[in-house]
Image (tube, rainbow, N blue to C red):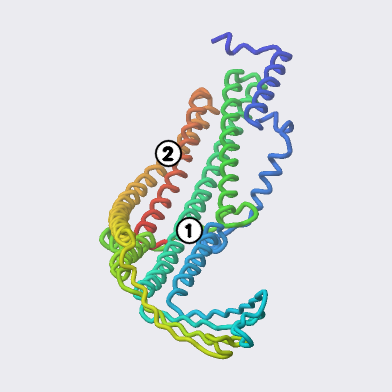
Amino acid sequence: MRTMTKKLPLPRMRRSRTTIALVASLTVGGVAGAEEALPSLPQATLADACCAQRVTLGEAVQRAITRNPQAAIAEEDVKRVEGTLWSVRAASLPTLTGNLTYTRLDNDRAVGMNVFSAANQMNASLALSVPLIAASRWLAWKNARSAVSVQQKSASDLRRTIAITTARTHLSIIAQRRLVSASERARNAARAHAEFARTRFQGGVGNRLDLVRAEQELAASESQLQSTRAQLTRLREALGVIVGADGPLDVAEREASLPESPGSVDEALVGAETRRTDVDVAKARVSLNRAIARDSWADLLPVVTGTFTPFTQNPATVVNPQLGWQAQVILAWPLFDGGARYGARRERISLAKEAEAQLEATLRQARSDVRAAFESVQRADEALVAAREAARLANEARDLATLAYRAGAVTNIEVIDAERRARDADTNAALAEDNSRQARLDLLAASGRFP
């Protein structure tokens, strides 16, 4: 004990303090006595991040839905399916085709003085074709229109996913800011402790072991603070990417407001089956695939088409006058196609059954999400109350340990232990707040109340 409290020579003390400051500046990036050696780039980067544009939860969600690249791709997918609808519809509508033919023969075709096919001939015609009976085409048109509706619901479900991801990131930034604040409080407490230990050591009252412990705790607190700040920067950048901004985004000062949660599990279960977009998409796909499979009978029916073709022939020939027209009714009935229609029908029935199984799985998962979310909200609220109480007691214990150390009643080991416990308790409290908010977001999403 006498060896530990013996005052060291001044040159050795200076070398040891310089070594501690140098090691701390290299491993942590900023502690007492070494802050001037820090590079300016991290400070500038941090200042730029703090000046990021602030958005509320509603603003972030709205901008993400309208500007996120995935949302834009979903809108283009809807337009693509609409283009397919037009292509399918074209087979059920009249078509008008213009034809112009020029024919050059080596010589006139004649018998004696009578020319029946001139060397130069010009033929022009218009061909109008109208499907008179085409059940398979009409049903394909109807199902293609339903496919557009399914794609629109899919785009809505993607926007819902984007909105939930945006909200999660927004809430994570709030939690990370709480962690930064907790780390800053821990760093400030450790700095005050280190300064007091240094003052005692320089005054010949304390010992170097207390000073080294205090500076080590300060270095650890500074390291955690910089890590939490780096994570906050990444979350801000992630929010900017999701929202479609060209830079990082920060959350507004006011607390994020979420819609009102459902009052009971039964109410949430009803909402999960009637308001969730993923359930709507699954139901729409079941309806579409059932209709396609049910309409397979139309492939066995004939197709009746009417055509009308006015034409002009110059010069007129024996079989074609100069002006004329032609009308036809064409019946096309495929009697044998190698089983292609029956194979298509089996494929459609299988797709319908797959869609039904997917709907059943989606509904089961939705109900599970609701039950789990209700339980998570209750447990997260209880954990939050306990974490806040633990943080309050840990900070009180730290203050008491600091007072006792200044009075000489305890060693700084108790102070350092109390500081660590207070820092961990503040961190757990911030995480508990985030868990509570995230659990409520999960409940809203599971019951179809968000966005």
Q: Position of residue 425 (x, y in %)?
A: 45, 38
Please tell me in which quadrant of the rendered image residue 358 appears.
bottom left
- Residue plotted at (37% across, 75% down): 138
**Circle 1 Cα neighbour tier, 10 Å, few/some/many (<14 / 14–19 / ≥20):** many
Instruction: Give the amino acid at mark 1.
Output: Ala
Q: Residue 133's mark? A: none
Q: Secondary structure at mark 2?
A: helix
Q: Secondary structure at mark 1?
A: helix
Residue annotated with mark 1: 163
- Residue plotted at (32% across, 58% down): 338
Instruction: Give the amino acid at mark 2.
Output: Leu
Please tell me in which quadrant of the rendered image residue 4 appears.
top right
Q: Residue 393's mark? A: 2
- Which is more toward the observer, 72 or 249? 72
- Which is more toward the observer, 70 or 384? 70
Above or below, 159 against 2 in this view is below
Q: Residue furthest top?
A: 3
Q: Are marks 1 and 2 in contact (CB under 8 Å)?
A: no
Drawn side of residue 300 relative to residue 223, left or right:
left
Please identify, in this view, whether the residue under mark 1 or under mark 2 is nearer the observer. 1
Q: Position of residue 38 (x, y in %)?
A: 71, 33
Give the quarter of the figure containing the N terminus.
top right
- Residue plotted at (57% across, 86% down): 317
Drawn side of residue 315 relative to residue 36, left or right:
left
Above or below, 237 against 425 in this view is below
Q: Position of residue 361 (x, y in %)?
A: 30, 53
Task: Name the N-terminal-most of marks 1 and 2.
Answer: 1
- Which is more toward the observer, 97 or 244? 97
Give the quarter of the figure containing the C terminus.
bottom left
Q: Residue furthest left?
A: 266
Q: Position of residue 419 (x, y in %)?
A: 51, 32
